[in-house]
Amino acid sequence: MASRLLVLIASIVFFQQAAANELLINAGGGPQPDSPQTNRTYGIDYSFKKFEKSVRQHIHLGVSYTRVETDADTHKSFDAYSIYPQLNLYPRKQSWGQPYFFVRALGPSYISSNQLGDRHQDNHFAFQAQVGYAARINWQSREDLVVMVSWKHFSNANLFSDNDGIDMPFVITLGLNF
């Protein structure tokens, strides 16, 4: 019974839906709330799977590399490797492209250091969360380009005792669908 369930889940995830093939490059930063430090970030994301629940709801699955740096005197950086689900909510179709709101939540992540400046995580496990506004822009007769503005956050969701969230309040992302 369990093996049949796994085969069913694998066929739904990997064979029934469209490939997303979306490459995104991002950079940003800003002041860390409740701390004197300022954080900076840059990274690259690749969405490899898209599930169209309706015209107004799409779910993307992807992988992400994020570099986070701070202006604090110690523990100045870490790298994060994440897998993420992303929910896109589209208000309506427009001729110049399509605006949407997006949420990434509970993207399991490995962070190379459990401290950034004065911010502490209990271990190297965290979640990536990101929320923002975006638009798919028509180029060459398709919605090929993506522009996003967002807030990015890493924390362990209080699963462990030390859970100082690490924030980048302003992130710009540019992407390409292929």
Image: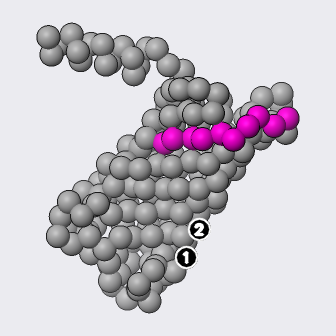
Question: Which amino acid does the dot numbered 2 rest on?
Answer: Phe
Looking at the rendered structure, the secondary structure element under dot 2 is strand
- Which residue is denoted by mark 1 in the rendering? 30
Residue occupying image coordinates x 53% and y 63%: 151
Q: Which mark is residue 170?
A: 2
Are the two marked residues, 2 and 1, in contact with CB atoms closer than 8 angstroms?
yes
How busy is the neighbourhood of tag 2: few (under 14 within 10 Å), some, or many (20 plus)? some
* Residue 170 relative to residue 112: left or right: right
Which image quadrant is residue 118 in? bottom left
* Residue 58 relative to residue 14: left or right: right
Residue occupying image coordinates x 14% and y 11%: 1
Residue occupying image coordinates x 41% and y 43%: 84
Q: Is residue 34 above or below residue 166?
A: below
Whole-number angstrom distance, CA of label 2 to CA of label 1? 6 Å
Reply yes or no: does residue 5 show up in magenta: no
Q: How is the image coloured?
A: one colour
Looking at the rendered structure, the secondary structure element under dot 1 is strand
Which residue is the extreme one toward the left?
1
Q: Is residue 61 above or below residue 103?
A: above
Q: Is residue 79 above or below residue 3?
A: below
Find the magenta span and give its range.
86-95
In the foreground, 170 or 42:
170
Residue 129 point in image, percent of width and height? 43, 56
How busy is the neighbourhood of tag 1: few (under 14 within 10 Å), some, or many (20 plus)? some
In the foreground, 122 or 43:
122
Which image quadrant is residue 113 in? bottom left
The chief SS type of the magenta part is loop
Residue occupying image coordinates x 73% and y 37%: 92
- Residue 174 in view in this figure: no
Residue 52 point in image, percent of width and height? 55, 26
Question: Which amino acid does the dot numbered 1 rest on?
Answer: Gly
Q: Which quadrant, please, contains the C terminus?
A: top right
